[in-house]
Image (tube, rainbow, N blue to C red):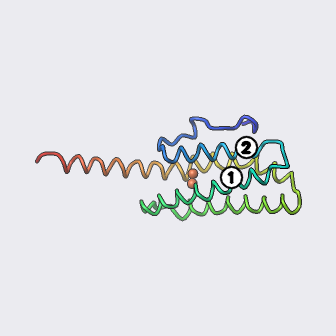
């Protein structure tokens, strides 16, 4: 993966449109972190953090609504990566650590791909199955006896 060309690809699609829409936005903001412009790094990171808070909150809500079994693990991954983003933000702002900024821009796409392949994939499938079960129960209910 070349950092400069990282972006949305079909391999990231989970066939659950509301989640894919959120992920498109994450990918765009995350890819923007690798722009070589130290003056705007904090601004770009703030945009990604703001997005991620909402992104993760939405997934946490879906997990609550559906009683998703590994919710704790999934939630923890969200919190851990947010903590990393905030820590990097602090060190870039206070210490001007541009190397760390570059490392975050390089590592986050890997984190995201792994997270999508595992936690988000499981959640999307779980929700798709619930929807399929609900609509087949609906069909059975409506079917003439
Ligand atoms: Fe996600
Ligand atoms: Fe997630």
Residue sitting at x 87%, y 56%: 97
Q: Residue 77: x and y, percent?
A: 62, 59
The residues tagged by marks 2 and 1 sit, at their Cα atoms, a distance apart of 9 Å
Q: In the shown orientation, is residue 86 left or right of residue 77?
A: right
Q: Residues within 10 Å of mark 1 (few under 14, many from 20)?
A: many
Q: Is mark 1 within 8 Å of ligand 1?
A: no
Which is more N-terminal, label 1 or label 2? 2
Q: Residues within 10 Å of mark 2 (few under 14, many from 20)?
A: some
Which quadrant of the rendered structure holds the N terminus? top right
Q: Residue 17: x and y, percent?
A: 48, 43
Q: Residue 15: x and y, percent?
A: 48, 41
User: Where does label 2 land, which residue?
Assistant: 32
Circle 2/circle 1 CB separation < 8 Å? yes
Residue sitting at x 49%, y 51%: 122
User: Where does label 1 land, which residue?
Assistant: 48
Q: Residue 145: x and y, percent?
A: 10, 48
């Amino acid at each position: 993966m070349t950092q400069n060309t990282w972006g949305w690809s079909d391999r990231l699609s989970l066939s659950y449109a509301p989640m894919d829409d959120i992920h498109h936005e994450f990918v765009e903001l995350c890819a923007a972190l690798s722009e070589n412009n130290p003056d705007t790094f904090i601004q770009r990171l703030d945009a990604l953090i703001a997005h991620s808070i909402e992104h993760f909150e939405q997934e946490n809500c879906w997990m609550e609504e559906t009683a998703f079994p590994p919710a704790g693990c999934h939630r923890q991954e969200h919190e851990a990566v947010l903590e990393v983003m905030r820590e990097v933000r602090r060190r870039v702002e206070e210490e001007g650590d541009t190397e760390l900024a570059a490392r975050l821009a390089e590592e986050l796409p890997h984190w995201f791909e792994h997270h999508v392949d595992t936690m988000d994939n499981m959640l999307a499938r779980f929700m798709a199955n619930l929807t399929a079960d609900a609509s087949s129960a609906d069909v059975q209910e409506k079917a003439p006896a």
